[in-house]
Image (tube, rainbow, N blue to C red):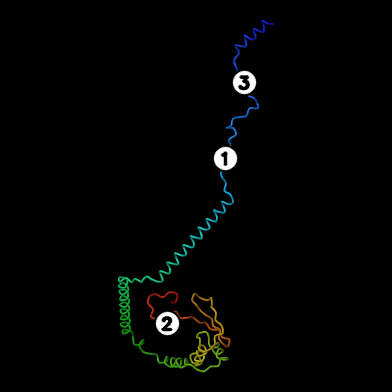
Amino acid sequence: LSSQHQNIQSSSRYLPHHNKPTSSHEPPAADSFRRPRPAPTMTKRHRLYLLLTLVALLVLLIFSTNFYFIRWLAVDQEHPVPEQVHSRSLANDSDALMKVVGRTASIQQLVETHVVRLKTVFKNRNPRNDPVKRGLVRSFGAKGYNISTVWKIASGWPSGNEIFPQKDEKIGKVIRALQEAQILRARNTPRGTQLKLVFDLAGKQSVLFKPSWYGRDARLEGPVYSGK
């Protein structure tokens, strides 16, 4: 036995040396406990401060913009910019006016020259038209009327080929009634493209009124557009 024990000891000298196993209770390294830090989050108080700051900047921007424009308008009213009229534009307008006048004069000369060359039948007045014209002028004179019957007279005039008879002199009464009758109601009519008004007059009569665009003494030049 003693010899075997010596052999085992001598053989154990030549066995490789192994590190001692670590105990299961030994704490791990500190690097294994390091975790990434969470990103800083915005709290409710920070959000409220940011919102109040944005609102204050917006109010300041609106106030400064309004103040600037009000100040600009006040300065503009105190010191209006004088209207500049270029001499070149005035010269062009005068040249255009002279051209129109010259063209009108030339057209008038052509008409007068052509009238002289007309036949005699076109120069003589028809004697049959004189009585009609005199009666028409006489019928347009203002006369007294009865509001209860004047509209019935006018409603019986229109026929297939005339609005009122040539020999009826009661048109003066209708004209005077149109001038003096009380307007009870006025409304717009959708008929046509131009402005027209419908007046309800006393005596249960409705009339169509079309306002004039220009005065009677106005001179119109250039092409006519939509009846204007």
Is residue 165 shown above or below 187? below
Q: Earlier in the sequence, mark 2 or mark 3?
A: 3
Amino acid found under the numbered disc labelled 1: Arg
Mark 3 falls on what kind of element?
loop
- Pair 2/3: label in front: 3
Please say if 158 is above or below 9.
below
Sequence-first disc among 3 and 1: 3
Q: How far apart are the alpha carbons under marks 2 and 1?
A: 89 Å
Q: Quick one: 108 or 210, which is closer to the camera?
A: 210
- Disc 1 packing (10 Å; few <14; some 14–19; many ≥20): few
Q: Which residue: 44% across, 92% down?
A: 137
Which numbered dot is residue 37? 1
Q: What residue type is labelled 3?
A: Lys
The residue positioned 57% from the left and 40% from the top of the image is 37
Badge 2 amino acid = Gly
Residue at image point 35% right, 88% down: 123
| Image location (x, y in percent) of residue 160 | 52, 84
Spot occupied by residue 115 in the image (x, y as percentages of width and height):
33, 84
Disc 2 to disc 3, C-alpha distance: 124 Å
> Which label sits on residue 215?
2
